[in-house]
Each structure stands twice: as structure tokens, then as C-alpha cells.
Amino acid sequence: MPTIYLDQAATSFPKPPCVAARMAEYLTQVGANVNRGVYGAAQQAELVELRLRQRLCALLDFADPTHVVLTPGNTWGLNLVLGGALHPGDHCIVSGMEHNAVMRPLQRLAKQGVTFDRIPCDGEGFLDLAALETLFRPHTKLVVLAHASNVSGTVQAAAAVGRLCAAHGVPFCLDAAQTAGHLPLSFRELGLSALSVPAHKGLMGPQGLGALLLAPDFAKALDPYITGGTGSASDSEEQPDYMPDKFEPGTPNLPGIYGWEAALAFLQEIGVEAVRAHDEALSRRFLAEIRDLPGVRLVGPADPARRVGVFSLDFVGQDNAEIAYRLEADYGIQTRCGLHCAPAAHKTLGTFPRGTVRFSTGWFTTESDIDAALAAVKALTAT
Ligand SMILES: Cc1ncc(COP(=O)(O)O)c(C=O)c1O
């Protein structure tokens, strides 16, 4: 029985073949650290790192490669923003659809005197812009938003949120874990102060790596959350205040950087618009059959134009964990069940604590994968 991987929201698989090839090339033929040596291999690695920053600028419509901070992952990037921007007495606004990558750091900061409010969201997960308008306080220092939900695929009106934040003079941080590489994204047009992305989902790179893009004024005001050696200003025991060194202590994930740079070249060759068209076509195919299927409830928007390819299903009257087990055991279909590290989103969507079975698609998902998933869901609900 062939395996069908429909857990792309957790991490994308397979990766383009160039990713493993470039990682192996680094490990077997380059091997040098960056910012620490002046010999050829070190300079070659620095060039690849610079190319990665430049590709991220091109993909995310961002002006300055020095303000692309390479992180050990999306969760780290979000922690850098939350932990560096919020101090006791400050107020933060998030939505009712956030991942624990935002909520756990925020709950920890709440114990130190940071307060926060959640923007209410409707039954499909869309935030209420009018309600957001009422949440700004004089001491609001940050708005953080998941661009698309990793539970329901709901895509938020980020540009409208950006305009409201600008009107109130509050920095806006977007968590693009589920949209980077899936939707055309413009740092500039969304009015962002910070944009955090993981390498390993829609951007097709390896795990353990991400990027945090910072607007210059926000980067200046942000405290470095983690400090250490940078290979620069080595005469000083203070963290450099220039970019990107201010936020990049320690040796970076160089095999990952090589792999991600290759992944982004692959993605740029395809074009994010083509990825979006593919995602949307698969969504239409899946939703057309699922929407009215008895025995299963789709959680989140039924309109493919307002979502990404992340579909949560609640199998009415059945145990969702048992369904996920049978999907793999009987049909070779790999999904993810439970609460997806996002209890807040499940509370908003009315699926807490029961959870859902999540099917998620990516560039390498085919129409026949979708048809196989549909056939399996129909068989599992036909009694
Ligand atoms: C919306 C959202 N935010 C944050 C994260 C955390 O990303 P990572 O686990 O890559 O650090 C995820 C991961 O699934 C996510 O879906």
C-alpha cells in the first residue's frame, strides 16, 4: 500500500531533491563556519548565507537583507519578538486563533506583568476587525497574528490589521507559518514590523531553521532576547547593536542554510503564484465533496479563496484519533489528529477538547492523493 502524506502543515515532504544534495555538499565539501574565518570555504559559506537572505527578500517583498535574521525556527523568531518587545506593564493583542508558539511565550510573559487581549473570531476563524479597533490601549506595544490557522486554514485580513496597527502606532508581527511559500506575501504591503517564517513548511527547506524579517525602526527598539558570540566585534563583551548580528548569536545551522537556499531557488523557479493556484485547485476538489458529506463536519471556511490547504474534519459520533489511525493503517494516509498545538483555535472553532483530524496539502500533493483521501473518508463515514 503506497503512503500518502497529507500532513504538510506539520512539515512539508518530500523536499525538492536539490535540498538534500546541497546539505550533503556543505557537510562533505565545505564544512566551514561563517563570520569567523577568511579562507575560501568560509567565504563561500557566507555567500550562500547572503544569497539565502536575498532570496527571502525577493520572495517576501522585503528591502534589506541585513534585516533578515536567520533563526533556529519559527517558534524562536516569535519568541525573539515577544520576549524582546514586551516588558512588565506592556499590553499585547493576539487573535483567538493563535498557535502555542505565540500563546506559551505570552502566558509566560503574563506571569511577569505583561497583559494581553484576544481579538474575537467567528465560527470559521475569521477575526473581528471592529473588535480589534476597541482593544488598543495606550500601553499596547505589539499585535501578533497567525496569518493562516494551522487548524482550519482560515486566512486573516492581514493588510487591514496592518492598517489599524499603523493608525494606532503599534508594531505588527505576522506569524506566516502556514502562508509563507503558499501565498504571495509582501512585507511592505502588509505594513509589518516583523514577519516570522519557518524554513520547513511551505518554503520547502529543512527543519531547525527559520527567518525573522524586521523593519529597521522595530529592530532598533527590540531587545536581543538571546545573546552570545557573533564572530564580529570580538573585543567587546556586549552584543553588537547592528544587524543582523544583534539577533544572530552562535553558530548557525549551515547545512540547513545550504538546503534552504536551494529550496528557495526551486520555489522561485516555480513561482509562489503557481503554488497558490495548485493549492486552490486541490482545495476546490476536496471541499466540493467534503462540504456536504454526512458524518463529517468541515471546520473552517468552505471558500477556497479565503483559506489555505489545511482542512480539519470532525467525524461526528466517532473517535477522531481512531479515524486518524485507520486512515493510515487501512489506507496509508498520514494525517494529524488532536489539538495541533493550538488549543485557543479549537476553543474558537468549537472543537476543544475533542480535536479534529487534519488533512493538509502542499506543492507535491496530487489530485490522486486528494481522491484517495476522499474515498477513504467516504468509506469511514459510510455506516
Ligand atoms: C501557525 C503556526 N505558528 C507557529 C508554528 C511553529 O512553527 P515551528 O514549529 O516551525 O517553530 C506553527 C507550526 O505548526 C504554526 O502552524
Image (cartoon, rainbow, N blue to C red):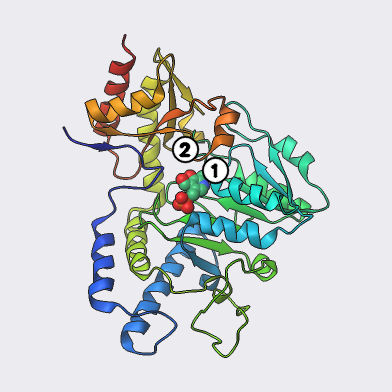
Residue 150: percent from left, percent from top: 48, 39
Instruction: Give the label on residue 99, or none.
Output: 1
Q: Quadrant of residue 43?
A: bottom left
Q: Is residue 256 left or right of residue 82?
A: left
Which residue sits at x=60%, y=84%? 237
Q: Position of residue 358 (x, y in %)?
A: 41, 32
10 Å crowding of disc 2: few (<14), some (14-19), many (20+): some
Q: Say which of 212 and 277 sits in front.
A: 212
Viewer can see residue 124: no
Q: Quadrant of the C terminus?
A: top left
Left or right side of 168 for 231: left
* Residue drawn 39% across the image and 41% down it: 277
**Left or right, residue 272 beside residue 165:** left
Label 2 is placed on what type of residue? His
**Residue bearing the label numbered 2:** 340
Other residues around mark 1 within 10 Å, as few (<14) / some (14–19) / many (≥20)? many
The answer to whether residue 327 is above or below residue 3 is above
Query: Mark 1 belongs to which amino acid?
Result: His
Label 1 element class = loop
Is the residue under label 2 in contact with that under label 1 (CB below 8 Å)? no
Label 1 within 8 A of ligand 1 by Cβ: yes
- Which mark, residue 62? none
Q: CA distance from mark 1 to mark 2?
A: 8 Å
What x and y, as percent, mark residue 14? 27, 49
Disc 2 Cβ-to-ligand 1 distance below 8 Å: yes
Q: Residue at x 28, y 60 (%)?
A: 19
